Image (cartoon, grey):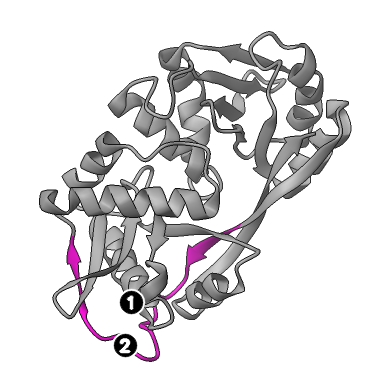
Amino acid sequence: MTWTFSTDLAAYLTAARPALAARPVVNTSLLTVTDSLERRGLHAHGTADPVFGWWTGADGTVTGALLRTPPYPVLLGALPPEAVRALGPELTAGPLLSGISGINARRTDALTLAAAWGRPTRIVEELRLYRLGTLTAPERAPAGRPRLAAEADLPLLLEWTREFNRETEQPGRASEAALRERLSYGGALLWEHDGGPVSLAAFSRPIAGASRVGPVYTPPAARGRGYAAGITHAATGAAHAAGAREVLLFTDLANPTSNGIYQRLGYTPVEDRVHLEAL
């Protein structure tokens, strides 16, 4: 049983993609980040080179994976307990992982790693993964209607994505290339009212039958009018229409409003994840 680490995307895909695709719900973030690296290049998320890792069990089968795309924390997928325990020493001694400062993992795995890391840590963000059960329309439909975002909306999409990243303290940068990729498959929708956009929701390209809604953003002046619920409902339906059998989303557990909205739309909790940061 062993971890293998590499900077070779092709080797990672060959080794780890079957394991990730076998559990697309809990591996949703790994699948979408990997897809972006394939489509837009190794530096799609930052200027530093990514690092890939996969866990091989005693029978020679790869059963879990991770990746690192600086400036983002190391992103762990679903892993067997023995893989999590074995990862602890790699965080300090492994040449490709030494020097990391953050981990994004399932809550139980993050706590195990915090104990094995040998460094004081703190939880900086708590997230909940939801999957759609039965899609339910908002109890009170907001004024306006949804529409697909188009090329002419690119400046607005870039501005709102930057604002979303700023409000949620995301370490990466808003990318025009990433937004153009979304537009290419109809993955961004806007809610319009009184002749202009008032809210945004996007969804990832379906991979292994799963798509994830996000980001969802409403400018502060337009909040409290149900637009987020309306555009999330529309984006969820669009993800299904694009071929997703499973539609997912993450929420910040510190935001009870968004958690309530998504549950009323038919989303049910799957698991919690945390962003763990070394002090």
- The reply to whether callout 1 and callout 2 are in contact (CB within 8 Å) is yes
Residue 82 at x, y percent in the picture: 79, 30
Residue 97 at x, y percent in the picture: 67, 17
Q: In this view of the protein, can residue 119 be seen by the observer?
A: yes
Left or right of 211? Residue 6 is right
Q: What's the amino acid at mark 1? A: Gly
Q: Which residues are magenta?
A: 128-148
Q: Residue at x 64, y 63 (%)?
A: 253
Give the quarter of the image for residue 276.
top right
Q: What's the amino acid at mark 2? A: Ala
Q: In this view of the protein, can residue 211 be seen by the observer?
A: no
Left or right of 170? Residue 189 is left
Q: Number of marks in the image?
A: 2
Whichever of callouts 1 and 2 sits on the residue coming sooner in the sequence is: 2
Question: Mark 1 sits on what residue?
Answer: 230
Of the pair 205 and 207, the residue shown nearer to us: 205
Of the pair 79 and 114, the residue shown nearer to us: 114
Residue 130 located within the stretch drawn in magenta: yes
Residue 35, placed above or below residue 166: above
Left or right of 205? Residue 11 is right
Residue 145, placed above or below residue 83: below
Q: Residue at x 79, y 43 (%)?
A: 122
Q: Residue at x 41, y 76 (%)?
A: 223
Residue 89 at x, y percent in the picture: 81, 19
Question: Mark 2 sits on what residue?
Answer: 141
